[in-house]
Image (cartoon, helix red, strand yellow):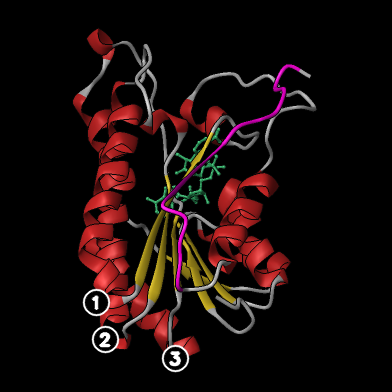
Amino acid sequence: MNLKNAVALVTGGSAGIGFSIAKTLGESGARVAITGRDKGRLDEAAKALGVFPVHADVSKEPDVERTYREVLAKFGDLDILVNNAGIGVFKPLVEIDRAAFDAVIATNVTGAMLMAREAAKHFIKRNRGNIINIASTAALRGAPNGTAYYASKFALRGMTECWRGELRKHNIRVMLVNPSEVLTNFAATAGFPQKASGGKLRGDEIAHAVKAILEMDDRGFTVEMSVFATNPED
Ligand SMILES: NC(=O)c1ccc[n+]([C@@H]2O[C@H](COP(=O)([O-])OP(=O)(O)OC[C@H]3O[C@@H](n4cnc5c(N)ncnc54)[C@H](OP(=O)(O)O)[C@@H]3O)[C@@H](O)[C@H]2O)c1
């Protein structure tokens, strides 16, 4: 697809990977909307990027429905949904509390589903569209302390396959991007330390991957792409 004048909606675009994706798509000529829960941070990011902010929580159905109303009122159309908003909780199984587990599933799974459902309704009507789900290498294999987060990303990967199966006949490309560790605020928000190093991934590499898979001619699509740091210890 040609990104020039395409309309892209990036959830969780106020920080980290989503911010980088919104920036790269905007620099490629797309008209971009971003969402986030913290209004101050969202408005600041939107101003810095020159994109359209929608103050919305992906886990809340009325917010999701309003997001599409606002984006369609602003741009009149939608070509791309990037399901990026995500949170993490990392605890041993015996220490997980129900509320924390539910919160991860509500944003990473239910939120992604609600956003994709509304995008798909629009895309089916116009007979084309793109959904990119930002999962993780946590969608590929389990690890200690990962119960909630890894379950959510396995679920997102599974939903991606279901949506791809349903939506291909409508010319809708459903794609999965699995970043390995990226330097963002994600770790701090999830409550664990992250060691920075020059070799670790930045949001820019993930944004590059997203742009690249979108720009392939619409006749084809990349089903899934995992992005690793070449030498994270460097
Ligand atoms: N960083 C990594 O190492 C890494 C690796 C693999 C995959 N990922 C995935 O990449 C995605 C982005 O992560 P990141 O590292 O960029 O995290 P981040 O820096 O913490 O940014 C997360 C973004 O999502 C927003 N957000 C969180 N919950 C939301 C909700 N319910 N509704 C709307 N917006 C919400 C946040 O804004 P508010 O808090 O204001 O809502 C923020 O804009 C996530 O899906 C994450 O699982 C990250």
Looking at the rendering, in which quadrant would you find the N terminus?
bottom right
Asked if disc 1 and disc 2 are in contact, CB closer than 8 Å, the reply is yes
Q: Which label is found at residue 121?
A: 1
Q: Quadrant of residue 153?
A: top left
* Residue located at (56% from left, 66% from top): 216
**Disc 3 to disc 1, C-alpha distance:** 15 Å
Q: Which label is found at residue 125?
A: 2
Mark 2 Cα shell of 10 Å, populated few (<14), some (14-19), many (≥20): few
Looking at the rendering, in which quadrant would you find the C terminus?
top right
Q: Which label is found at residue 76?
A: 3
Q: Main secondary structure of the magenta part?
A: loop
Q: Is residue 188 left or right of residue 37?
A: right
- Is residue 113 in view from this perspective? yes
Q: Nearer the viewer, mark 3 or mark 1?
A: 1
Asked if disc 3 and disc 1 are in contact, CB closer than 8 Å, the reply is no
Q: Which stretch did the figure color magenta?
A: 219-233
Q: Is residue 21 left or right of residue 148?
A: right
**Disc 3 to disc 2, C-alpha distance:** 14 Å
Q: Say which amino acid is labelled 1.
A: Lys
Indicate the secondary structure of the residue bearing disc 1.
Answer: helix
Q: Say which amino acid is labelled 2.
A: Lys
Mark 3 Cα shell of 10 Å, populated few (<14), some (14-19), many (≥20): few
**Disc 1 to disc 2, C-alpha distance:** 6 Å
Work out whether 22 lies above or below 17.
Answer: below
**Would residue 122 be counted in the magenta stretch?**
no
Q: Is residue 142 left or right of residue 212?
A: left
Work out whether 214 lies above or below 92.
Answer: below
Indicate the secondary structure of the residue bearing disc 3.
Answer: loop
* Residue located at (46% from left, 52% from top): 84
Residue 59 screen position, x and y as percent = 29, 53
